[in-house]
Amino acid sequence: MDTITNDEFRAFEGVEDWHPDGDGVRAQFRTGDFATGARLFSAIADLAEAANHHPDVEITYPRVRVRLTSHDAGGLTRKDAELAAAISQAAHDLAIDADADPSR
């Protein structure tokens, strides 16, 4: 699969929550509690399995951090953009907001 640039990634609809991170992108979602984080992780796991594309996910008490990259392609691909948009939609459906600055 061909890699895409950060600008090409940004052109995909629904990826506004995501920010460049080396050879990938990351987002952080404010869940407020562990149970809500677990619900979001469950949704992410289902999306990742359906796409056969698996992000790195970190769940903590107040937030869920997600990082996407296509290791086999050596950077971002269309699969990353599509999964990022789906993850953001799942968070929105659960009324979970993304942090504007995911480095916090």
Image: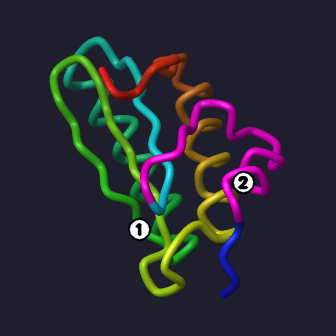
Amino acid found under the numbered disc labelled 1: His
Q: Mark 2, residues whose alpha carbon is within 10 Å: few (<14), some, or many (≥20)?
A: many
Q: Which mark is residue 10?
A: none
Image coordinates for residue 71, horizontal then vertical, percent: 42, 78
Q: Nearer the viewer, residue 30 or 101?
A: 101
Q: Is residue 23 above or below residue 15?
A: below
Give the residue displayed 59% in from the left and 50% down from the top: 84
Give the residue at mark 2. 9
Quadrant, the N terminus: bottom right
Q: Mark 1, residues whose alpha carbon is within 10 Å: few (<14), some, or many (≥20)?
A: some
Q: Give the quadrant of residue 95.
A: top right
Amino acid found under the numbered disc labelled 2: Phe
Give the residue at mark 1. 54
Q: Is residue 46 above or below residue 19?
A: below
Number of numbered discs visible in the structure rendering: 2
Image coordinates for residue 2, horizontal then vertical, percent: 70, 83
The secondary structure type at the circle numbered 2 is helix
Q: Is residue 58 left or right of residue 73?
A: left
Question: Disc 2 to disc 1, how far (Cα)?
Answer: 17 Å
Give the residue displayed 57% in from the left and 38% down from the top: 18
Q: Provide the residue span drawn in magenta.
A: 5-22
In front: mark 2 or mark 1?
2
Give the residue displayed 29% in from the left and 24% down from the top: 63
Quadrant, the C terminus: top left
The secondary structure type at the circle numbered 1 is loop
- What is the image's colouring? rainbow
Give the residue displayed 36% in from the left and 47% down from the top: 42
Sequence-wise, the earlier of marks 2 and 1 is 2
Q: Is residue 18 above or below residue 80?
A: above
Q: Is residue 37 magenta?
A: no
Image coordinates for residue 60, horizontal then vertical, percent: 17, 29
